[in-house]
Image (cartoon, helix red, strand yellow):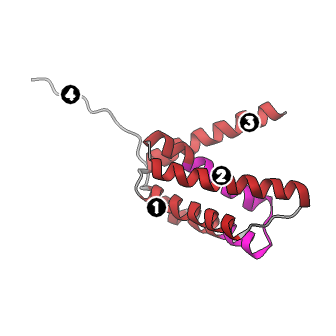
Amino acid sequence: MTRRKRKPRPCAAPTIVLIQTTNLELHERMSVQAFVGGWANTDHFDNLADCHDLLKLAASEKRDQETLAVCELSGIALLNVKDRYAETGRFGVTGEEHKALQLLADASKDFWSRQSGTFFHSTWTALQQMRRYQREKAA
């Protein structure tokens, strides 16, 4: 009998560990609070936009309709915030937008806590490639 060779798979820490060690959840929740408190800046907006886009990429891959619905709702809120910033030069949210962004942070934690670290890493890499392409296209 011949033995089959085992294919090594990439390994990574579970996503729940990555969330805690990188303070990912903390950054997302602080960004939401920055909008509510009126001290948000472009870094807070970019953080929530990355959270949204990363979650949308992953939920599309997993065909998670519930998470995609949260992404749709929070995407509208983020676009409203962006439009308001373009008009006034200040970041802020309405009550409904705050609820949508809070839901985004909650859904992100819930979704990523159930995924593998390898899936998180591959999705994060895909998001970084997408951002690079967007910057090149804009230039």
The amino acid at mark 3 is Gln
- Helix, strand or loop for the magenta stretch, by majority: helix
Gap in angstroms between the C-alphas marked 3 and 2: 18 Å
Question: Would residue 112 appear left or right of 132 to someone viewing this image?
Answer: left
Mark 3 / mark 4, whichever is N-terminal = 4
Mark 4 / mark 2, whichever is N-terminal = 4
Q: Residue at x 79, y 58 (%)?
A: 42
Q: Residues within 10 Å of mark 4 (few under 14, many from 20)?
A: few
Q: What residue does disc 1 label?
A: 110
Eye-nearest disc, 1 or 2: 2
The amino acid at mark 1 is Asp
Gap in angstroms between the C-alphas marked 4 and 1: 38 Å
Q: Residues within 10 Å of mark 3 (few under 14, many from 20)?
A: few
Q: What residue does disc 2 label?
A: 75
Gap in angstroms between the C-alphas marked 1 and 2: 18 Å
Q: Residue at x 14, y 23 (%)?
A: 2
Residue 51 appears in the picture as rendered: no
